[in-house]
């Protein structure tokens, strides 16, 4: 279990911490960054009540503890946490085959220089601290490729979280309310339209603005979506700058209306 609920970095271990992770912890703590560790051995593993934004793990540990890994991945998605992985090339490649790439922030291939790796992790913590002051955007889309693309587009100016399913997004929003949701229309199990209907029925979600960002432009889809009164309807086929400008304009208009 997490001893310090305010930890900024969580090291995942399997019974004991490795020499590399121990060295990284010592170097990071020296910069007044709060660090903790969590044992994810499957027989003793319990889901923590909250997760920091950064999790550090040896690739072999996640490969060895498959059930714990699945739970942690779901939690990363719900809470906007991301992984920093350490390992041999083969282990990292194997792990990436069973991992949503968008939740992996950084990979370090052995052998690593602990000082260089800790400096990189420290800079990531500082970036995350700065992002906490930014507008929060949640991107809900079932395409891992588009989630990576959206993260790359938005991460410079916004505090971005991603989610590959509408049901997970509902759970995520209940604990981490965004300032804007970018929503795909076509998703399995629960479509974007169904998600928006559910969101509007939730007390904690009915005032969260939603902009559809989808490939569908047929009149029937547009009519259905607009009947749900989203704040906008953008096409993925639009140029990147047009999409970013529309999002920026939305926040500018929201700020102006808050003063009136």
Image: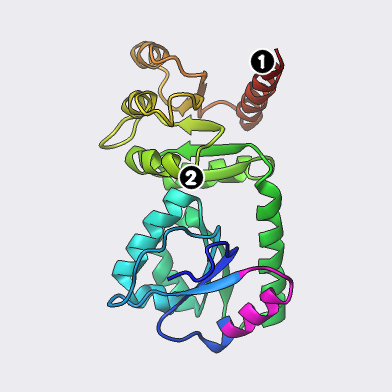
Against 246, residue 131 (above or below) is: below
Q: Is residue 112 left or right of residue 149?
A: right
| Badge 2 or badge 1: first in the primary sequence | 2
Q: Between residue 238 and residue 258, name the one nearer to us.
A: 258
Q: Residue 190, position in %: x, y?
A: 29, 33
Q: Is residue 97 left or right of residue 26?
A: left
Can you tell which mark lies on residue 229? none
Q: Residue 232, position in %: x, y?
A: 52, 19
Q: Between residue 187 and residue 228, name the one nearer to us.
A: 228
Q: Residue 2, position in %: x, y?
A: 47, 69
Q: Which residue is mark 1?
A: 257
Quadrant assignment, res 91? bottom left
Q: Residue 212, position in %: x, y?
A: 47, 25
Can you tell which mark lies on residue 162? 2
Regarding residue 64, the answer to whether it shows in the image is: yes
Location of the C terminus by quadrant is top right
Q: Residue at x 43, y 31 (%)?
A: 204
Characterize the local packing of mark 2: few (<14), some (14-19) or many (20 or more) Cα atoms within 10 angstroms.
many
Location of the N terminus by quadrant is bottom left
Residue 7 inside the magenta-drawn segment: no
Secondary structure beneath dot 2 equals strand
**Dominant secondary structure, magenta:** helix
Q: Residue at x 50, y 80 (%)?
A: 88
Q: Residue at x 62, y 27 (%)?
A: 247
Residue 25 inside the magenta-drawn segment: yes
Q: CA distance from mark 2 to mark 1?
A: 27 Å
Characterize the local packing of mark 1: few (<14), some (14-19) or many (20 or more) Cα atoms within 10 angstroms.
few
Regarding residue 98, the answer to whether it shows in the image is: no
Residue sticking out furthest to the left: 189
**Image: magenta residue range:** 22-34
Against 142, residue 83 (above or below) is: below
Q: Is residue 260 left or right of residue 83?
A: right
């Amino acid at each position: 279990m997490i001893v310090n609920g305010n930890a900024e970095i969580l090291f995942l271990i399997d019974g004991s911490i490795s020499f590399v992770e121990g060295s990284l912890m010592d170097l990071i703590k020296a910069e007044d960054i709060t660090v903790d560790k969590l044992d994810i051995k499957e027989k003793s593993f319990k889901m923590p009540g909250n997760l920091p934004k950064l999790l550090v793990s040896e690739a072999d540990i996640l490969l060895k503890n498959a059930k714990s890994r699945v739970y942690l991945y779901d939690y990363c998605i719900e809470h906007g946490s991301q992984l920093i992985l350490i390992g041999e090339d083969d282990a990292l490649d194997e792990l990436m085959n069973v991992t949503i790439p968008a939740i992996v922030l950084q990979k370090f291939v052995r052998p690593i220089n602990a000082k260089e790796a800790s400096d990189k992790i420290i800079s990531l913590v500082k970036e995350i601290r700065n992002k906490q002051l930014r507008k929060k955007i949640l991107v809900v889309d079932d395409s891992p490729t588009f989630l990576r693309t959206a993260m790359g587009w938005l991460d410079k100016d916004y505090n971005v979280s991603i989610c590959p399913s509408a049901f997970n997004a509902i759970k995520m929003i209940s604990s981490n309310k965004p300032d804007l949701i970018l929503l795909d229309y076509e998703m399995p199990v629960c479509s974007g339209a169904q998600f928006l209907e559910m969101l509007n029925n939730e007390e904690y979600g009915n005032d969260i603005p939603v902009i559809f960002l989808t490939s569908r432009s047929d009149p029937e889809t547009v009519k259905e979506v607009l009947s749900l009164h989203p704040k906008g309807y953008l096409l993925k086929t639009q140029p990147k700058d047009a999409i970013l400008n529309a999002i920026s304009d939305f926040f500018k208009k929201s700020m102006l209306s808050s003063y009136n």
